[in-house]
Amino acid sequence: METRVSLLLSSLIIAMTIQIMSPISSAFDLNIGYYDDTCPGAESIVKSVVSGYVYQNKGFGSGLIRMFFHDCFVRGCDTSVLLDPPSSKLDPEKNAITNNLSLRGFEVIDAVKDFLENTYPGVVSCADIIAFAAHDSAYILGGFSYDISSGSRLYPTIDPTMDPDFALFLRTQCPEDASTDDVVPQDFVTPNVFDRQYYDNVKSLEGFFFSDWSILTSFETNSLVESYSTVPGLFETNFGKSMVNMGNIGVLSSAKVRSGNHVVM
C-alpha cells in the first residue's frame, strides 16, 4: 500500500510539473545516446542494476522517480540531493524534513555508480545516472518509455558565459573526484589581496558564476564594473561607505552588552 501511494504521489508531482512548466531552453545540448562512444552500454548497465533493486522492492522505483524530481526541479540537475554533509554539524539536502521520509534509492544510485566507475571510470555523471534510473523505474512500474537525453551534466560545468580557455583551466584545478577539502581561489590573479581585481576578471569573462557575467548585461552595473576597474581608489572608497551604511541598519542603541559571544542572558 505504501509503495502504491508513494508511486501515485510521484506520478502526480511529475504530471503537475509537466503541466505548469513552459518549455525550458538549456545553454547546453543534451543528446540521446550521449554515451554510446565513451561508455557503450551505460544505459543498459543502469537498467540492469535498477531492475534488480526495483523488482525486489517496488518502493525503490517510486523513490528514484521522486529523486529525479527533487534533484532537477529547483535549480536543475546538479545531484545536490546526493551530497553528504562536510561535517556532522550540517544537515544535507537529503536529510531535510521534507525529504527524509520520502527520498529513497540512494543505495541504488551508489551501486550503479560503482559498477560504471569500475568499467568506465570518470565518464558517466551522477546526474545522468539519476535520470536513467528514473526512466527505468517508470518503465518497470508503468510499462511505458520515453527518450532520455544525457550529456552536459558533467562536473565541473563550463558556463557558456565564461572564457573558454579559463574554463578549461578550471577543469584542471577542479577534477571530478575532488574532495570537499579541495578549494581554489575565486581570483587567480591576486588571491590573497582584497582589491578591485574582481572587476577586471568579470570584464575578461573569468568569473566563476553566471551572476558575475550578468552584471555586464545591465547599463547601471556594467558602468560600475568599468569604473571600479579603471578608476584607482573608487572601489575602496565606495566599499568603506557601504560598510558604514550597512552597520547603521537597525541599530540597537540600548542593547545589553553580553558577557559572551554565544549566549544570550
Image (tube, helix red, strand yellow):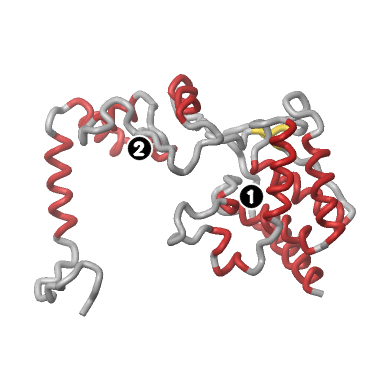
Amino acid type, callout 1: Ser
The quarter of the image holding the C terminus is bottom left
Instruction: Answer above or below: position of 159 versus 81.
Output: above
Residue that lies at the very extreme toward the right in this rendered image:
143
Q: Judge left or right: residue 225 versus residue 50.
A: left
Mark 2 is surrounded, within 10 Å at the Cα level, by few (under 14), some (14 to 19) or many (20 or more) other residues, namely some
In this rendering, would 163 be left or right of 152?
Answer: left
Where does the image place residue 81, in percent across and percent down from the top left?
58, 53
Instruction: Give the residue pinned by disc 2.
Output: 215
Residue farthest bottom in this picture: 265
Answer with left or right where residue 29 lies relative to residue 259: right
Q: Is residue 67 above or below residue 214?
A: below
Structural distance between the alpha carbons of marks 2 and 1: 26 Å
Q: Residue at x 81, y 49 (%)?
A: 136
Q: Position of residue 135 (x, y in %)?
A: 78, 48
Q: Position of residue 30 (x, y in %)?
A: 67, 34
Q: Quadrant of residue 20?
A: bottom right
Q: Secondary structure at mark 2?
A: loop
In the image shown, does 128 or 53 lie closer to the viewer?
53
Residue 78 to residue 226: above or below: below
Residue type marked 2? Ile
Q: Residue at x 32, y 31 (%)?
A: 187
**Which of the two discs, 2 and 1, labels the residue nearer the N terminus?**
1
Report the residue marked by disc 1.
Answer: 22
Residue occupying image coordinates x 28% and y 38%: 220
